[in-house]
Image (cartoon, rainbow, N blue to C red):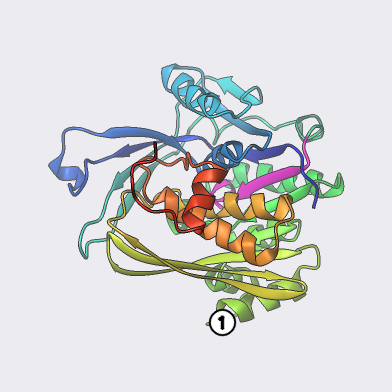
Amino acid sequence: MSEGRIAGFGEIVLRLCAPRDRRLVQTRQLDIHVGGAEANAIVSLAQFGHQTKMISTLADNALGDLAIGELARFGVDTRDIFRTEGRVGLYFLETGSVRRPSRITYDRVGSAFALAETYDWSALLRDVEWLHISGVTPAINAHTAAMAQAAVSVASQSGIQVSFDGNYREQLWRAWNGKSAEILKGIISCATVAFVNERDVNLILGSDYKDCAAAHQACLEAFPNIQWLAATDRQQSGAEHHVLSAILTGRDGVWRAEPCELLSVVDRIGGGDAFSAGMLHGLITKLDPQHAVRFAVAASALKHSIKGDFNIASINDVMEMIEGGGLDVQR
């Protein structure tokens, strides 16, 4: 795997979040964070020192300015984020507590990204060696699904490595009766790296695997372009107490990261994107597979301690966690 510029393609959204432990109907105040599956991963990769850029479309207004400013602040090249009339996509988060799960309400219909004109992929990907995309992008509507398929097709034909994060979002697919299995199968067939678990694989292949390792092997057989598959496993005994582990499957073996206990979780949103970014960093820089999957889990674990969608942790932060650094004040 070669190291080079990494582009993300997807919608940049604003998260409106009720204060901790409150339900949306209880609050008159909302915290605002910039996010989006691909943007989250790209920001994290920028913190790891990679050259990154974001390809997207945003409303040409103050909210669009806010989103672009946040990505630029964390080192992402924003020159290929197009501006147009319209609105910024939103989602509302009600954070869970004790045994009550977190809930998300989307407000993305008719956003500038959802209605964006066709992109010139040959030009946009000219300086790119990796393209990262998630299952959220094709789930928005038929138009974004076609854009996602075009992006990965051009990338694959141009020798660009494609990273695909399953990120299945039933609410979005159901809203327009999208043919999720058919569309996601076309996208994953172009991928070099895929972040999918047994539920994703079962949806795409129409199978019924109960075990992620078996599902990964079936995915490798079905899609010869894929070289690596990775997935996290999350066990929860409460909204703030999680145990996180992961599996990495390659053509030559399977590697697992030991479980990592997360107590008093601050914010789990973006944790999967942080894992994807950590895994990509490990694969692109040719870390040993066992080290790569440990790095990815540690990166995700750190995200759970950071408010907002972005994982603003450096390589040193992740390595300190892997090496068992204590909780004394760092001076």
Q: Dot 1, crowdedness within 10 Å: few (<14), some or many (≥20)?
A: few
Hey, which residue is sitting farthest left in the picture? 26
| Residue 226: quadrant of the picture | bottom right
Residue 321: image x %, image y %? Answer: 47, 54
Hey, which residue is sitting farthest front in the picture? 331
Hey, which residue is sitting farthest right in the picture? 158
**Residue at 53% across / 68% down in the picture?**
246
Hey, which residue is sitting farthest top in the picture? 61
| Residue 183: quadrant of the picture | bottom right
The answer to whether any part of residue 314 appears in the image is: yes
**Residue at 67% across / 42% down in the picture?**
147
Span shown in magenta: 128-139
Residue 330: image x %, image y %? Answer: 39, 40
Residue 134 in magenta stretch: yes
Q: Which residue is mark 1?
A: 208
**Residue at 44% across / 55% down in the picture?**
301
**Residue at 56% across / 73% down in the picture?**
198
Residue 258: image x %, image y %? Answer: 50, 71
Residue 109 against residue 163 in the figure, above or below: above
Viewer-nearest residue: 288 or 94: 288
In the visual, does 1 lie left or right of 324?
Answer: right
Residue 20 in magenta stretch: no
Residue kind at label 1, given as amino acid type:
Asp
In the visual, does 108 lie left or right of 230?
Answer: left
The answer to whether any part of residue 195 appears in the image is: no
Residue 182 against residue 212 in the figure, above or below: above
Viewer-nearest residue: 192 or 327: 327
Viewer-nearest residue: 5 or 104: 5
Residue 163 against residue 222 in the figure, above or below: above
Give the SS element for disc 1. loop
Image quadrant for the C terminus?
A: top left
